[in-house]
Image: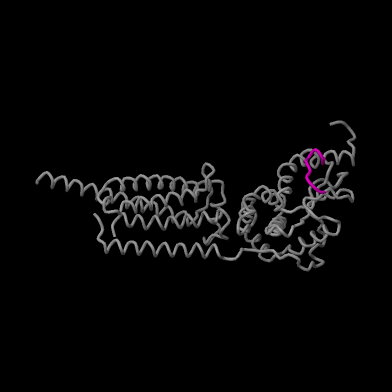
Amino acid sequence: MNYRMAAALMSLIGLFVSAYLYLYKIGRIGTLACGSGACETVQTSQWSRVLGVEVALIGVVGYAVLLGVALAGLRPAQAERRGPALALAGLAGAGVLFSLYLTYVELFVIHAICRWCVGSAVIIVTILLLALLELRRVGSAGSAATRLAGTA
Amino acid sequence: MAASPVGMKRFYGLLAAIAVIGVGLLGYQLAKPATVSIPANVVVQPNDTAGFHGYVKGAESAPVEITEYADYQCPFCQTFATLQMPTIEERLIKTGRLRWRYRDFPLQQHPFSRLAAHSAACADDQGKFWEQHEKIYEGQPEWAAVRDAGPIFRRYAQANGLDLAKYDACMSAGKYAGRIQASYDEGVRVGVSSTPTLLVGGRLYQGRFDSDAITRLVDSLAPRTSAR
């Protein structure tokens, strides 16, 4: 299992978490399995929408794009290219910043923590770490190849 | 590093397993029966209606009373509640000229009318009837076409600051199913057949109304004593 594979698996899990929250938000699912009312407090607050768009829907789209990029980066022709790893790191970085903002709102504005949101935050941070490790790997493989070419 | 064919096979197997589990769990959540349903045509018990004659807004001393028979899922009722009522409230109810009585008349063709009426009744238990009433009408486009409106009404209850444990208990018990049925039966008895219908001084007014028409009606029944 390489870093891109792990990132793809994490993205798929994140996609399901976001889809679950979105289906709740649009009234297709009853109560959230949360253990407390905190998830509903967060999901029903005014901060559950950003610029008129449901945060959960942003999550669904974001994770779907991450999954697509991770899968595309697994194709043999892309496996050693830096582009997919850079795209993964960029997208996941943006996701982490967004998660940081949402966590700040949960802690200091709404004063309620949604476990599913925490789960999503852990997933996006993990994807970012995997993308950074992949960037390092591709970078060092590239330098080794350059060195090899230089000695040939 | 490109993965070996065996590694790729394992990876896709794992990806497919997660996809199947995820879709299965979401499908299970979607297929679960509606969280709460309020039965229609229940036998009305005497204590269902004891001391209750609708939700009232306005001064006891107001010279005119209008009883509205309405259905939360009826589009005309929604337009009336959201566009006309605020003006009626400012112009007539708050000035002490009109008392408004709201009665449920859930039409059979609307699957969530009774649930909405019951949600508002449970909010009334906690002194938040009008807040829930307004949220339900304002949100009609959001909930009218969903599979289960219960969670959306619950969300409104939460936004209105209701104690959700008490609200859930009230909804699950169908505490006000009889009262809603009694309100409907009473509407039928006085001749209501569509919504919204207004009952004013023993006369029924059906159709679409606006705040100007209501003002003229109130003016005709209780002329103003001084120019405002």
How is colour applied across the structure in the image? one colour
Residue in the picture at 73% in, 60% down: B108
Residue B21 location, x and y as percent?
A: 44, 65
Give the quadrant of the C terminus of chain B. top right
Whether residue B157 sits left or right of residue A142 in the image: it is right
Q: Magenta segment: does it hold B207?
A: yes
Residue at horizontal 82 percent and vertical 50 percent from the top: B67
Q: Quadrant of residue B182?
A: bottom right
Q: Quadrant of residue A9?
A: bottom left
Residue shown at 41%/58% (left/top)?
A13
Residue nearest the viewer, comparing A92 with A151 = A151
On screen, residue B48 versus residue B225, left or right, reads left
- Give the residue at x 34% y 52%: A70
Question: Magenta stretch containing residue B8, yes or no?
Answer: no
Residues in magenta, as a range: B206-214
The residue furthest left is: A152
Picture layout, residue B24 above or below residue A113: below
User: For the image shown, how many numbered marks are present on the structure?
Assistant: 0
Location of residue B125 in the rendering, given as x and y in whole percent from the top left corner: 72, 58
Q: Give whichever of B60, A121 is nearer the camera.
A: A121
How far from the left and from the top, in percent, is residue B213? Answer: 82, 40
Instruction: Pick the quarter of the image with the N terminus of chain B.
Output: bottom left
Q: Is residue B184 left or right of residue A95?
A: right
Report the residue that reaches farthest toward the top.
Answer: B227
Return the x and y of residue B96 as percentages of the image width and height.
83, 41
Query: B30 left or right of A15?
Result: right
